[in-house]
Image (spheres, coloured by chain):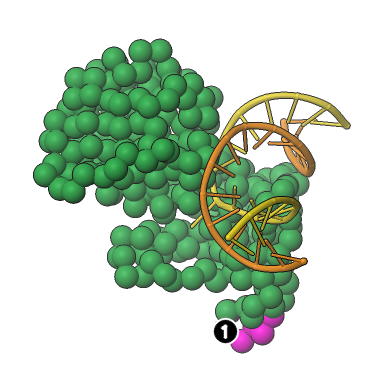
Chain colours: A green, B orange, C yellow
Amino acid sequence: MPELPEVEAVRLELDPYFTHYRIEDVDVRRPDLRDPFPRRFRARLTGQTVERFLRRAKYLLATLASEETLVMHLGMSGSFHVSAAGGPLREIDTHDHVIFRMSSGAAIAFNDPRRFGMMTLLTPKQLAAHPVLSTLGPEPLSDAFDAAALARVFRGKKAPLKMALLDQGVVAGLGNIYAAEALHLAGLSPSRAARTLVTAGGEPRESAYRLTAAIKQVLTRAIARQTVKRYRSARFQVYDREGQPCLRPGCGGTIRRRTQAGRSTFYCPRCQR
DNA sequence: ATTGAGACCTGTCGGC
DNA sequence: TGCCGACAGGTCTCAA
């Protein structure tokens, strides 16, 4: 279930259990997730203190006193479950693949039925040269991400907007849901070519400003909703709403669903151009 | 160089 | 109730 807002919620939840605590032991219950765990994974983690617990795109990064970084990704079905010290013990689930035993007494279990997630441990050199992590686009909620930045990566790009937004090298952290939501909010068709938001001279068009603003708004709201639990049931504007009325005031269109590059895209043909 | 399709793996849900 | 296919919020690889 995780796109940027969900991963950010996980980071917030886990931070108090990881940061400043020592990893006493790691229960590695299988040798791999999407990829095999690196050499001496358990030994390199054991005894390390977590200095910072950060998020980059959809990745969680725990920086260790050893200077190495524990990198974790939730894939499609990954989640964490914390058993706080003295709290109720959680039964170990079949899909609990890695359990961190912290010096606070907390146990943090990584659970991932589909095993599309990943977990690895990188030296500073490996981190800087990592083929994926080092080529991620800007964080969408940072000041580095604005219409000009979007115009730079969209210039000359023939790919449809939906695909361009899913490209983590363009902007980092959007997934299938929030890409659809941002395009709907911006009133832009998912199949429109990315380069049409840029002038011949490489300047962002008005639509590029709309899209960057929409991305920021959709993610900011989703993060707020994540952290304030009572809004958990809030629905999306377009995602998974095929056949239902468009929620844009005064639009009156009907949400459609189609497949782009093997993924479902939801949009309103009436107000998204 | 881009781009689309297929693969990875398990669980869930709707229809018959 | 049980079986079967379609589908799921992510990414990687490979062939065109």
Q: Quadrant of residue A29?
A: top left
Residue A154: x and y in percent read: 65, 47
Report the front residue among A76 and A176.
A76
Mark 1 residue element: loop
Q: Is residue A71 placed above or below A257 in the rendered structure?
A: above
Could you say which is closer to the camera, residue A30 or residue B3? A30
Residue A167 position within the rendered picture, expressed as x and y whole percent measured from the top left: 60, 43
**Vertical comparison of A13 with A75: above or below:** below
Q: Residue at x 58, y 79 (%)?
A: A248
Q: Is residue A181 in sight in this rendering?
A: yes
Residue A243, located in which quarter of the rendered image? Answer: bottom right
**Taking A249 as reference, is A268 left or right?**
right
Q: Amino acid at mark 1?
A: Pro
Q: Residue A39: give x, y in percent of width and height.
A: 40, 12
Would you say residue A249 sits in the magenta stretch? yes
Residue extent of the magenta highlight: A248-253
Compared to residue A180, the image places residue A60 above or below, namely: above
Q: Identify the residue at horizontal 69%, vertical 80% (top origin).
A: A253
Q: Identify the image quadrant of the C terminus of chain A.
A: bottom right
In the image, A47: left or right of C7? left
Magenta segment includes A93: no
Which residue is painted at 74% across and 61% down in the image? A258
Residue that numbered label 1 is attached to: A249
- The spot of residue A209 in percent (x, y) is 56, 61
All told, the count of numbered labels is: 1
